[in-house]
Image (cartoon, rainbow, N blue to C red):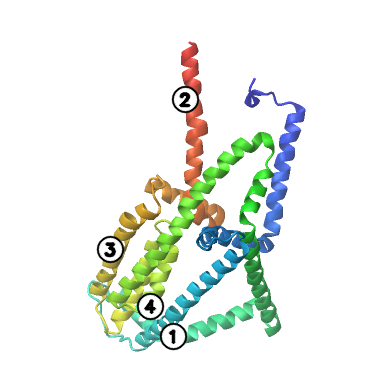
Amino acid sequence: MSSSSRPYTFDRVVRILAGLAVLAAAVWLVNMLRNVLLPFALACLIAYLLDPLVGYNMRLLRLKGRGLATILTLVEVAAVLGTAGYFFVPSIINEINQLDEIMRHSTSGSSIPFVPADIAGPVIKWVEDFNIASFIKSSHFMQLVNSGSSLLGATVDFLLHTLEWLLTFIYVIFILIDYPSLMSGFRMLVPHKYRRTVYRVEDDIKDNMNRYFRSQALIALCAAVLYCIGFSIVGIPMAIVLGVIVGILYMIPYFQYVTLIPVAVVCFVDSSSGAASFWPELGACLVVYAVSQCICDYILTPKIMGRSMGLNPAIILLSLSVWGSLMGILGMIIALPATTLLLSYYRQYVVNIGMEAKSRTTTDM
């Protein structure tokens, strides 16, 4: 008799209830300690993304230990981020100042073709009265007021956040140094009789995560570069900021198109000052979207991602809605690999097993 057809004895029911109680207690404990576990979880994600670079440095320099390779990897990442900040941060500040200057010189008498005056008028009036610098200062002030209403409270909050980031950095170092041993140690914690099934699940999860997160991060970086270049060629304000935002949202399928709204608003603001025409500038931005998407979808994704995740667009949108409702932004990020994994196991353990049972029944008859 198989394990699935065993009768529900008192002992078995007690074991099931005890297992559910332990699971509920674990979920409750994780929820209570989420602020403490967040730096560790973030460090695990960073270490997971940087582990291939550590291995590459070990092979390139023929190093035996991972300590020097880990430090070298962190130095390389810091150098890349510092160089990017050195070149891009001044441009971003200049673009913000440029947009603020455009909004100051916007003309209330300007009109936009095919846009009703009762819609364009209030927006242009809001653009005239809006001041970016005062908005940032007032937002910062309100944040200080809401967070503690005192300088001491704001200082303590700042120090705690700084300590969290420092703790995350320390976690990353130690996790990267012992990454292979930690992974093998987690595998050894699985009871021997469950190892075959758990290892197969772990390998499938690892394959899906590797194929999605690392590959999608590289594609998102390439997309950010393409959009920054495209928006800069078009000449809209905040070109680099908008390109970086598109690249970040590229980690979530189809979410890069949300940036069409701020792009249209920026084009509207630019046209209200008389510096450009709204529809030609917006049309040029749409061309940037079309060209960049073609490059990403038909050139970069097949080369970097390999075979696709194999999901219908409707299933992708449904999975984004479901996982996003359950886990927020994190759920939307993991929606695609998690849904692919669940569907593969459904086909393997439900559909295939059902077909095998049906074939055996037909054979016996």
Question: How far, Cα to Cα, is label 1 from label 4?
Answer: 15 Å
Read off the residue under disc 2: 355
Check whether the beta carbons of the residues at disc 1 and disc 4 lie within 8 A of each other.
Answer: no
- Residue type at mark 3 is Val
- For label 4, the SS is loop
Q: In the image, is residue 244 above or below residue 328? A: below
Q: Are marks 2 and 4 in contact (CB under 8 Å)?
A: no
- The answer for how far apart the CA atoms under marks 3 and 1 are is 34 Å
Q: Earlier in the sequence, mark 2 or mark 4?
A: 4
Three-letter amino acid code of the residue under disc 4: Met
Q: Which residue is mark 3?
A: 291
Whether residue 116 sits left or right of residue 20 in the image: it is left
The span from disc 3 to disc 4 (Cα, nearest Å) is 20 Å
Q: Which residue is mark 4?
A: 238
Which is more toward the observer, 115 or 103?
A: 103
- Badge 2 amino acid: Met
Instruction: Write down the quadrant of residue 149 in the picture.
Output: bottom right
